[in-house]
Amino acid sequence: MSGHSKWSTIKRKKGAIDAKRSKMFSKVIKDITVAVKEGGTDEESNPRLRLAIANAKGINMPKENVQRAISKASDKDSKSFSEVTYEGYASHGIAVFVECTTDNLQRTVSNVRSYFNKYGGNLGKNGSLSFIFERKGIFTFPAKDIDMDELELELIDAGAEEIENEDGIITVTTAMEDFGNMMKKLDSMKIETEGANLERIPVNTETLSLEDAKKVMKLIDIIEEDDDVQNVFHNLELTDEMMEEM
């Protein structure tokens, strides 16, 4: 999981530097919309909506924005979104998994394919990367005054596989099937997460030279900038040298 922790750190630093708040808000609003369409506006009976609202708090989205998104999504004439994934390889054989939420599937697949083609990669068939990534629950929250020994005992009982404290941020990893249990446990402990998501973690990572890695990251960055894209996962090993560059 060390590679994942490094990438989480990079994303936090990049987010602070690039100030891509509007993109982050857009992602959460889509999550809220899909959640409301699927399970209604009551967050107590709609765990997906509860999760989306928690993630909205994690990025400091104003409450009025959240409520506006919920109200808009509950309108039967509001835009509907489909969730779709794409799998492919960047240059040098780096696996790339893309999660999208879109109101136009044709536009989305056309855009994603064009990014792969432009940056020396190729889009593959769905399922082709199933052996490379595992779905894991990833929770992040500030360490603050938390007693790590006590926290570990509590969270291991709820299914924590790994608990890391880096740069004042605690990252908890669970199996996909323990995601809900961990959400309930953190709620019961009054711990507000900055992020709580099912992510695709590479079983093994690939190391490239700095120059080759930069080319791969150009593809990752351009995909992430697409409005239809929610998440991008890859199996490139992020070395200390790359961390400094980024």
Image (cartoon, rainbow, N blue to C red):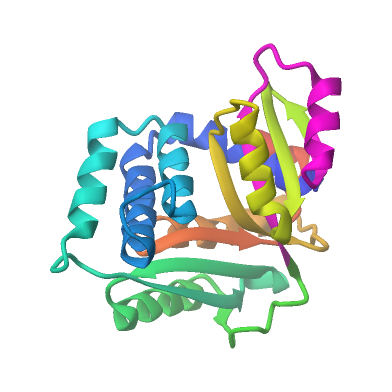
Question: Which quadrant would residue 126 be assigned to in this image?
Answer: bottom right
- Confirm whether the magenta stretch covers residue 132: no
| Residue ranking furthest to the front | 45
Query: Which quarter of the rendering shows the C terminus?
Result: top right
| Residue ranking furthest to the bottom | 125
Name the spot of residue 148 as percent of width and height, x first: 81, 21
Question: Which quadrant would residue 87 be assigned to in this image?
Answer: bottom right
Is 59 left, or right, of 2 in this rendering?
A: left
Is 71 left, or right, of 15 in this rendering?
A: left
Residue 182 vs residue 239, the one in the foreground: 182
Name the spot of residue 69 as percent of width and height, x first: 24, 48
- Who's the residue at 61% across and 38% down the image? 10
| Rendered view: 109 above or below 181 | below
- Who's the residue at 76% across and 58% down the image? 208
Residue 150 vs residue 215, the one in the foreground: 150
Viewer can see residue 4? yes
| Rendered view: 146 above or below 186 | above
Viewer can see residue 245? no
Is 101 left, or right, of 125 in this rendering?
A: left
| Rendered view: 139 above or below 90 | above
Name the spot of residue 122 as percent of width and height, x first: 56, 81
- Who's the residue at 56% across and 33% down the image? 193
State how many labels appear.
Answer: 0
Which residues are the magenta region? 134-163
| Residue ranking furthest to the top | 145
- Confirm whether the magenta stretch covers residue 155: yes
Name the spot of residue 84 as percent of width and height, x first: 46, 75
